[in-house]
Image (spheres, rainbow, N blue to C red):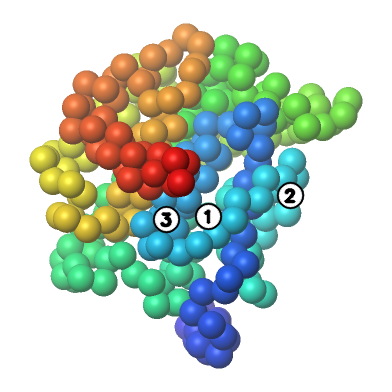
């Protein structure tokens, strides 16, 4: 692993810090993307914007199949293809862009713990809602996953994906949970995040870190998606400082860009 990292760092060091034609590949937002992917795409977009790194969003119906890990989004920077939030953060860090550079070692350890909690709880909750809840799976998730494929792939691929996600959640004890148990996990996660944020602008003071990008991606996706049979947005809105945090991030990094 060290040899790979050293080789990558040497390769990166021989090139420009940030190429001018970086692309972020994602599924189509309106027709295709599902809740877990929406959260991950938002988190990566926000992180890159917080780093002030230019990139172009490239929408592809087969973005998942193009990805080196089979998940979205993925970044193309020069000769490198990097997918998933943590590897993208690490890759950007090797380029010399680190949002957490001013944190102490203790604070960095705390940041990693909160990031792990968000991905473990909110990430799994998004998968549970999308694939384990039959109403949402049948009415929302499966049609969106199958929308870009011809028959019979438009029903085969969603079924295979559902089986894959169920097995994944089963292995960590999430597949057999009740909706109430999952929502309680989400509330507990939000409570911990709310207590950490308090009335600060960002989770670690006046400057953003990757935790802010990750939390925004997941919470904003959950706050804005419309799902049958569950009002998870209502649960999150009970945490006023988290809701206001999402509004601030949206206004700073997304609405301003749209208005330009």
What is the number of the mark on residue 116? Answer: none
Camera-side mark, 3 or 2? 3
The image shows residue 133, relative to residue 62, as above or below, that is above
> Which badge, 1 or 3, is on the more N-terminal residue?
3
Q: CA distance from mark 1 to mark 3?
A: 16 Å
Residue 39 drawn at (x, y percent): 47, 39
User: Which residue bears the numbered disc 3?
Assistant: 49
Q: CA distance from mark 1 to mark 2?
A: 14 Å
Q: Are marks 1 and 3 in contact (CB under 8 Å)?
A: no
User: Which residue bears the numbered disc 1?
Assistant: 84
Residue 63 drawn at (x, y percent): 70, 48
Give the SS element for disc 3.
Answer: helix
Give the SS element for disc 1.
Answer: loop
Name the residue rendered at 59%, 56% in the picture: 56
Give the SS element for disc 2.
Answer: helix
Among all residues in the image, which is located at the extreme right? 151
Camera-side mark, 1 or 3? 3
Quadrant housing residue 76:
bottom right
User: Which residue bears the numbered disc 2?
Assistant: 65
Residue 20 drawn at (x, y percent): 58, 71
Quadrant housing residue 187:
top left
């Amino acid at each position: 692993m060290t040899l790979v990292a050293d080789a990558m760092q040497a390769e990166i060091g021989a090139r420009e810090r940030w190429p001018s034609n970086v692309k972020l590949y994602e599924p189509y937002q309106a027709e295709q993307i599902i809740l877990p992917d929406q959260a991950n795409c938002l988190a990566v977009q926000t992180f890159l914007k917080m780093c002030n790194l230019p990139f172009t969003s490239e929408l592809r119906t087969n973005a998942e199949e193009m990805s080196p890990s089979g998940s979205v989004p993925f970044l193309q920077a020069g000769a490198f293809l990097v997918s998933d939030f943590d590897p993208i953060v690490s890759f950007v860090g090797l380029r010399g862009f680190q949002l957490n550079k001013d944190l102490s070692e203790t604070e960095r350890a705390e940041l990693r713990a909160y990031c792990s909690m968000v991905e473990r709880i909110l990430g799994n909750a998004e998968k549970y809602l999308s694939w384990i809840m039959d109403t949402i799976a049948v009415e929302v998730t499966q049609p969106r996953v199958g929308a870009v494929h011809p028959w019979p792939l438009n029903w085969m691929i969603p079924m295979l994906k559902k089986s894959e996600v169920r097995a994944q959640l089963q292995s960590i004890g999430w597949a057999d949970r009740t909706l109430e148990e999952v929502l309680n996990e989400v509330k507990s996660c939000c409570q911990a995040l709310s207590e950490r944020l308090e009335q600060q602008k960002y989770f670690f003071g006046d400057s953003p870190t990757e935790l802010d990008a990750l939390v925004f991606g997941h919470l904003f996706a959950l706050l804005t998606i419309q799902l049958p049979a569950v009002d998870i947005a209502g649960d999150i809105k009970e945490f006023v400082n988290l809701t206001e945090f999402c509004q601030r991030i949206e206004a700073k990094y997304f609405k301003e860009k749209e208005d330009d």
